């Protein structure tokens, strides 16, 4: 069971933990982060406790600079407002803070994600004769993707989630190529990474198509390709995710153990 | 000027069959008790507007009172799906549910326009999304100075807004604090406003982060302690996360839901589940 | 992140010749000390934006630093005319003053659009007025849903916003309360933000009616007790109405104004009149 | 010097006091009033202390439901916020409260006023070769006139103020006739009265032209006509202003004596 020393942390970390640590690390250099519930909240709170202590967490419920002591179940839990630097109305949040271009990083999940980082969270086509499967809908996603400086997509790696063709475009990533965002007037850079439980995809700068950029320790390119619904290409240099440090893993597990109210 | 009313009377007078009703509260201060009173009175054929339909609208939809939903995110926050909402959309049970679907930014700005007496609001939204093709309340407008094309959303002016707040005074001035979401806009956009409050007090002392709705923009105030449960009222209660998690199993099954409705809302008319 | 700075340094670094500068504060919290520092440093060819130019801009205009004024009401509140403003407009003394003139609603919405990252805002304004014919920042737009024609105003994004607030903490988070006017919008619309405060404290305790600007939207904070005088800072001072009344005589005459400027602003460099 | 009993109050009241009392009385039935500084503030505070105790005073500085104990010098005096039911930002005031149609009565002053209640507060033409005289400008007036349920114009009666033709239209009253407001989409009824130190003019319902409706005691129609810059017509029934009651006059004088900080 023992592995070389450098990989010890990775061996101990689950695929989900690697995904969470990678998501936290992807916040490097960010000052402000728009935080949704679930993995984004875990990642942002982990980053604030490890590499990005000054990170400003902004929840769409109106809390700016929230400092929760445990992971909230909903984006409107009382502790978010109680610990925030400022609490604003929801219209102010979306108009002055998000659309105003003040948020560096936005996290988005996806029921379906295509090779250009476009996202479907609206409905799933189950084939003729069957009603479409209803998903929650857009929430803040279209404008998070439009206005945040950059977007991190977080999704479990499976052909069901990473698809060849979306059943519905809820939220634009890179459209169909590298110029679409500029043409449509979207201010932010759009998706810069898709962080999964197997590794990380990043858009090819020339084509904006997502390519394999990083593999979790022990995961093969073949396995990732089999879990991707389009013919996935690899970047020129595919790296291996550095295993979580002891501090990262301990902090992450502590955060989640104190989630208490988690699902 | 707001009247201080019994909840049953206030709901009966202000909310009518076929109305467009906005029950707002972003996770915090959700007016569950008023929604349950609507169920008890069987007020039906409603168009319900709300950014996050949440469990409160799952209950009203499951009760068969809702013809149309205007919304931006229909999930059980932190838990999963809204099963009654899905069942209505996917299978038309207990009745078909029409949708007018927006993003959060779009919904918030629809209320802003409604509160501001404008027919529409402008935002940098929906770009590249399929959503505008499925809604007649999303359009585009060009900036007359730069020529840039932006999204426009139609004003949303509900017949009735229903909100829950911490306190009111005896004249009906309403005070709320904490995460106040889009409630001010929803109330000012609506033709009629019903507010349930944790308590009615002699004097509204100022509170940090507090916001006041003067009595003359409110139609009725009803004192309903715990009226936001399983949501919460900062300073009075905390969110009942266990209720939200338990809702998943209750709502997943039509029979289990119906049994819940009978026992918890209809069977105990006049009393609120705490 | 805001730097805690000496006023002289902060003004020198953030405000440059030719900038568009918005010094806001609606009667309350007007940043006079910063304006006087601009005069002492002779920062010139400014475009000044402000809903109510007030005595603060009368002083800057009289000092010959202003090329253009963007405004909505140019009087000495409760007293009468702004004589330096009138002298500049009517006689070009000490230099001609270009105007971009709006209504209050138009100016407020120009800042709103600027803060919201939009190129324009919509309002039901200027209808039947001659004002649109004299401004290239007023236009019309048609509602894409109803066809109604409404007014549009161009976003106002100053190079610098200067505001006065009650307090900041040592990290530069700024807290203000009372009548907060259009300051949040002006600050969020501007490329750079300078805040003078009554005091810098270890911790910002919550205050009813308070509003916070996080340090990361502010460039510099300077501690200037009394920096709003003759305006006021609720909780710290009251409005010096006698100063406003006395200003009428001081400003009515070019020589009297020049003597005032020499004695009260330039002659006592580094010290603020209290 | 003695006059019949009914006119005693009027004999004691100055023309300005009659104007102030008339302005306060014109608030009958109003729930909310948008208050500017000067006479409007005097009238609204007088009304709140006499005939309209529930009148909600709204100052454009952001104070809703202010209850000042003395007349403020500026619309942003601290006491307004301290005594208000709610304090809102200036954009919220203009967008949600004024434009939102929540204010019954707005007061406006005028440097020039024409026969249709249109107002100039921008500039005065002094003739060729002389620069135009600069006035303060629009302030809140165009939107107050657009969105308040009704508008009361208050002006001293002289041919300089009540003119045949405006040098500049800052704020639309009735345009050029009774249909102009509806055609332009102005929601409020517009000016319903011009209250002066000689009497009151009101728009003729058929033409929207201002006609003489009320004279202060002792003032003749001829005197008013001489003080009006257009050929003033009289309403079918011109009434005489009821003299101030003792309570009105005492309250008014007390208010003004406690103005303290007044100009």
Image: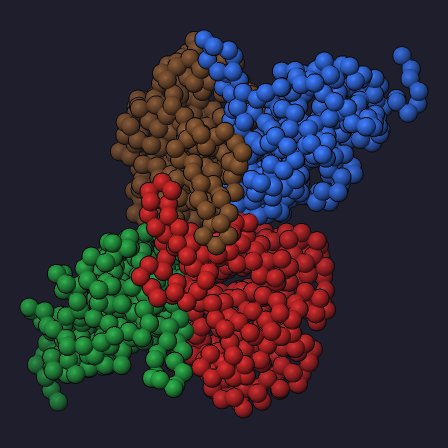
Chain colours: A blue, B brown, C red, D green
Q: In the rendered view, does B119 fall on the left or right side of A155?
A: left
Picture residue at 52% right of the left edge, 88% below the top: C254
Residue C126 percent location from the top left of the image: 36, 60
| Viewport quadrant of the C terminus of chain D | bottom left
Q: In the rendered view, does D127 fall on the left or right side of A151?
A: left
- Say which of C127 and D61 sits in front: C127
Q: Is residue C70 visible?
A: yes
Picture residue at 51% right of the left edge, 11% below the top: A127
Name the quadrant containing residue C38: bottom right
- Say which of A93 and D176 sits in front: D176
Picture residue at 52% right of the left edge, 58% below the top: C156
Picture residue at 43% right of the left edge, 18% below the top: B89
Residue A186 percent location from the top left of the image: 58, 41
Residue D239 vertical position relative to residue A126 in the rendered view, above or below: below
**Furthest residue in direction right, as rendered:** A4
Residue B120 percent location from the top left of the image: 39, 44
Residue A19 percent location from the top left of the image: 74, 25
């Amino acid at each position: 069971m023992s592995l070389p020393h450098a990989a010890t942390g990775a061996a101990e970390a689950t695929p989900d933990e690697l995904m969470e640590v990678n998501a936290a690390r992807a916040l490097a250099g960010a000052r402000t982060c728009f935080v949704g519930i679930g993995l984004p909240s875990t990642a942002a709170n982990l980053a604030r406790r490890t590499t990005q202590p000054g990170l400003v967490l902004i929840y769409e419920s109106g809390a700016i600079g929230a400092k929760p002591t445990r992971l909230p179940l909903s984006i409107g839990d009382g502790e978010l407002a109680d610990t925030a630097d400022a609490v604003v109305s929801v219209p102010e949040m979306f108009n002055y803070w998000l659309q105003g271009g003040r948020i560096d990083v936005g996290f988005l999940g996806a029921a379906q994600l295509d090779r250009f980082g476009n996202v479907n969270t609206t409905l799933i086509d189950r084939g003729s004769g069957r009603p479409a499967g209803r998903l929650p809908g857009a929430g803040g996603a279209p404008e998070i993707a439009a206005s945040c400086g950059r977007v991190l997509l977080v999704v479990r790696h499976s052909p069901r989630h990473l698809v060849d063709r979306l059943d519905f475009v809820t939220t634009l990533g890179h459209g169909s190529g590298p110029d679409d965002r500029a043409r449509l007037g979207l201010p932010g850079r759009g998706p810069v990474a898709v962080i999964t439980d197997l590794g990380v995809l990043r858009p090819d700068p020339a084509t904006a198509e997502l390519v394999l950029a990083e593999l979790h320790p022990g995961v093969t390119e073949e396995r990732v390709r089999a879990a991707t619904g389009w013919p996935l290409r690899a970047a020129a240099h595919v790296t291996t995710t550095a295993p979580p440090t002891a501090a990262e893993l301990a902090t992450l597990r502590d955060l989640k153990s104190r989630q208490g109210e988690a699902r | 000027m707001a009247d201080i009313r019994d909840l049953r009377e206030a709901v009966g007078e202000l909310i009518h069959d076929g109305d467009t009703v906005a029950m707002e509260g972003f996770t915090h201060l959700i007016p569950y008790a008023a929604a349950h009173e609507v169920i008890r009175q069987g007020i039906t054929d409603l168009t319900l507007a709300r950014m996050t339909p949440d469990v409160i609208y799952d209950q009203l939809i499951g009760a068969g009172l809702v013809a149309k939903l205007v919304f931006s995110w229909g999930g059980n926050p932190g838990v999963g799906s809204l099963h009654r909402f899905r069942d209505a959309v996917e299978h038309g049970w207990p009745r078909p549910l029409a949708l007018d679907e927006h993003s959060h930014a779009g919904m918030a700005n629809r209320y802003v326009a409604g509160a501001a007496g404008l027919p529409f609001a402008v935002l940098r939204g929906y770009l590249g999304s399929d959503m505008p093709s499925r809604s007649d309340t999303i359009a585009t407008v060009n900036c007359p100075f730069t020529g840039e094309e932006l999204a426009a959303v139609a004003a949303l002016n509900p017949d009735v807004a229903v909100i829950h707040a911490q306190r009111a005074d005896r004249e009906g001035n309403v005070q709320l604090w904490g995460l106040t979401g889009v409630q001010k806009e929803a109330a000012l956009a609506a033709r009629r406003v019903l507010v349930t409050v944790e308590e009615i007090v002699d004097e509204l002392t100022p509170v940090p982060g507090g916001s006041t709705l003067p009595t003359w923009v409110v139609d009725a105030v009803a004192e309903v302690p715990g009226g936001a449960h399983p949501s919460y009222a900062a300073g009075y209660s905390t969110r009942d996360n266990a209720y939200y998690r338990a809702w998943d199993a209750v709502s997943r099954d039509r029979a289990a839901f119906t049994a819940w409705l009978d026992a918890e809302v209809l069977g105990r008319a006049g009393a609120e589940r705490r």
